[in-house]
Image: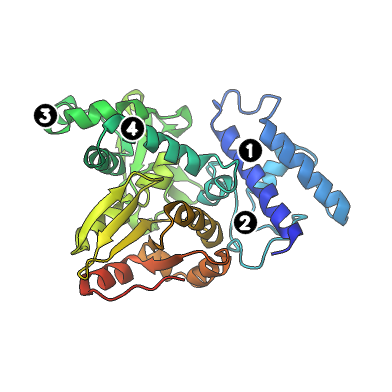
Amino acid sequence: MTEDERSNIDLLATLARGVIELSSLARSSAFRLPYPPSLQLALDRVVLAGLTRGRPVPAGVPELLAWCREPGLVGWPLTMPSGYLTGDAGLIHPVTDEPTRTCAELASLGPYGVLEQEAEALLGTLADACGSTERFATCRDFLMCRPVILQFDPLELLRPATAQTWRLVKELYAPVPDRFQVDELVYRCKGCLLLARSQTADGSWCEGDCSPEARALESSHRPRQVMALPFALRLFLALPGRTEQAVRSRLTGRVSLYPLGLGVHRVTDRDGMPRAFQVHDREQPAPAALRAAEVAARLDAPLAVVVPDVRATRPGYRQEFEHALPPGARVRLLSASEFTAAESTGRRVTHA
């Protein structure tokens, strides 16, 4: 990767952070000046790159945001490493105007990353409050199963079996932003359990980008009572949560949780060998590889990154993930089926 390509990746991450910051503002104030500083900085750098290369430049932030709605980086004055982003990558959904998963993943890159790091910080605070790894694991599972609470049911949440968990996690929930209310309804996707929209120009939409056949929606007629986790936890904890829980349920060895990051687990195989794994569900393989390498370095051990089967079989995903890994990174990408089969039969899983 050339220095110019590294600089352009950093620029794209800065722009992604600006889009995330803009989306966090109330709709009534989102179009008032000044724009978020990260967005202004990204505009300046894109304009400089365009002028330096003799390429078209955006006239201002509104036009830059319009560029972010277009798939791919066609026409941008940026040179990215081959295969770093998928050809349809965009930062803003062209219909809903919501930040895309690609945007969130790019915004988490580098020392100034904002979303994945926010999720890790929130979980770290929760782990401290829990006082034990077992209680923290119970709270994580609660959050993964309930990223969006359409209807608060005190009979369920305050019964003895869940009351302590709810007491520990309830401060993580907040009212759903007004922009997700449509005709006094708030929608949740049954596939990913995340927020959704029922009618757009392209049909329904959900934050997890579920396939149309998996995108059955359910709604609440009391939008003011709907509560949701922060976007960071919805995307980086709850979205891969179903895959993680399915993987854990199929493992025959003893599974324990490290209170580290978004959730690194250790499974002891039939030979008594401990192996570390983390479940991902990321749209862009190259940024995912860079974040996985950071986790492995903090863990100081080989790390298996486990992804949904449909993700691992996407053409080019595995190759681009492995290509983006820094030299010496002890990370191996495996599908959920590959990982559970290997651990259940006792086969050795080698690491890059």
What residue sits right under mark 2 in the picture? 71
Spatial CA span between label 4 and label 2? 41 Å
| Label disc, if present, on residue 128 of the rendered structure | 4
Towards the viewer: 293 or 64: 293
> Answer yes or no: do the residues labelled 2 and 1 have beta carbons within 8 Å?
no
Eyeballing the image, is 197 above or below 325? above
Q: Amino acid at mark 2?
A: Pro
Q: Residue 259's spot in the image, x, y percent?
A: 34, 44
Mark toward the start of the polypeptide (2 vs 1) = 1
Q: Nearer the viewer, mark 2 or mark 1?
A: 1
Spatial CA span between label 3 and label 2? 49 Å
Q: Dot 4, how many residues are within 10 Å of its Cα: few (below 14), some (14-19), or many (20+)?
A: few
Residue pictured at 66% horizontal, 43% vertical:
15
What residue sits right under mark 3 in the picture? 160
Q: Residue 194's spot in the image, x, y percent?
A: 37, 43
Residue pictured at 20% horizontal, 69% vertical:
270
Q: Amino acid at mark 4?
A: Asp
What residue sits right under mark 1 in the picture? 18
Mark toward the start of the polypeptide (4 vs 3) = 4
Spatial CA span between label 1 and label 4? 31 Å
Q: Is residue 197 visible?
A: no
